[in-house]
Image (cartoon, rainbow, N blue to C red):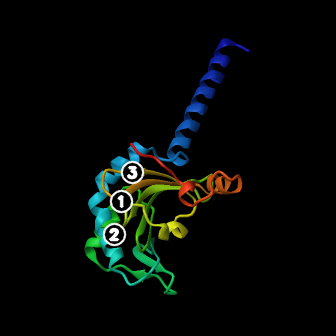
Amino acid sequence: MSRKSMARVAIGIVLGVTFGAVIYIIFFAAPSFGRMERSFYRNYEHMAVVLDFLEEQKYYDIAIRRIDREFKMLTSYEWYPIPIEDKTVIASLDELRRQGVREIYYSPGVTFFVKWHSLIEAGSSRGIVYFADGYKSVYYWDRIVFLVGLEPLSEDGWYVYTKNIEEWFGRILLGWSNSPRGQICLHTS
């Protein structure tokens, strides 16, 4: 093999590894706490508008998704998606979508703004969560299964969360924890 062909092979390997690393970072790696924190501060006002809107609704569980180019609420009480008509809320939802928020889930007292889903591990996600009572009530535990990490933000009740089904089941099945609160690793500064 000549030096020229060895150089081509080496360049091909380096480019392949670089391309693979870039693809992994863009599509598969969870965003860091720092990225999530910057996103929170950039989008806090929009999240607050959506949160106020959700707290005024008469429904118990709500998911907000974009369906047929409109934002709609999916609830456990209605058989059809409910269009959102408030222009201020729609503007905030548009901006949150542009900033990478993929889905929003609401139950009284807890709201998830999902920024990332794993393409490899089903059920793994990362985003920002708001607890109305600052993460103190056991009432919410049936709604936040698979939660394995919370990192507090500077605003009361707001956290960066991490969900991972495999890790959560591992903690339960391997006896890593005996109580729901012990299943979550709460990081504090």
Crowding at label 2, few (<14), some or many (≥20) Cα neighbours within 10 Å? some
Q: Quadrant of residue 85?
A: bottom left
The span from disc 2 to disc 1 (Cα, nearest Å) is 12 Å
**Secondary-structure class at tag 2:** helix
Pointers 2 and 1 in contact (CB under 8 A)? Answer: no
Which residue was labeled with disc 1?
A: 157
Q: Nearer the viewer, residue 157 or 42?
A: 157
Q: Residue at x 65, y 51 (%)?
A: 176
> Measured from the top left, where is residue 151 in percent x and y?
43, 49
Q: Which mark is residue 103?
A: none
The span from disc 2 to disc 3 (Cα, nearest Å) is 18 Å
Of the image marks 2 and 3, the number of the one nearer the N terminus: 2
Q: Residue at x 57, y 53 (%)?
A: 118
Judge depth for marks 2 and 1 and give the one in front: 1
Q: Residue at x 67, y 19 (%)?
A: 5
> Measured from the top left, where is residue 60 in percent x and y?
45, 80
Judge depth for marks 2 and 3 and give the one in front: 3
Which residue was labeled with disc 2?
A: 51
**Secondary-structure class at tag 1:** loop
Q: Quadrant of the N terminus?
A: top right
The span from disc 1 to disc 3 (Cα, nearest Å) is 8 Å
Q: In this picture, is 131 found above or below 89?
A: above
Of the image marks 1 and 3, the number of the one nearer the N terminus: 3
Which residue was labeled with disc 3?
A: 152
Pointers 1 and 3 in contact (CB under 8 A)? Answer: no
Residue type beneath disc 2 = Leu
Crowding at label 3, few (<14), some or many (≥20) Cα neighbours within 10 Å? many
Residue type beneath disc 1 = Gly
> Measured from the top left, where is residue 122 in percent x and y?
62, 58
**Secondary-structure class at tag 3:** strand
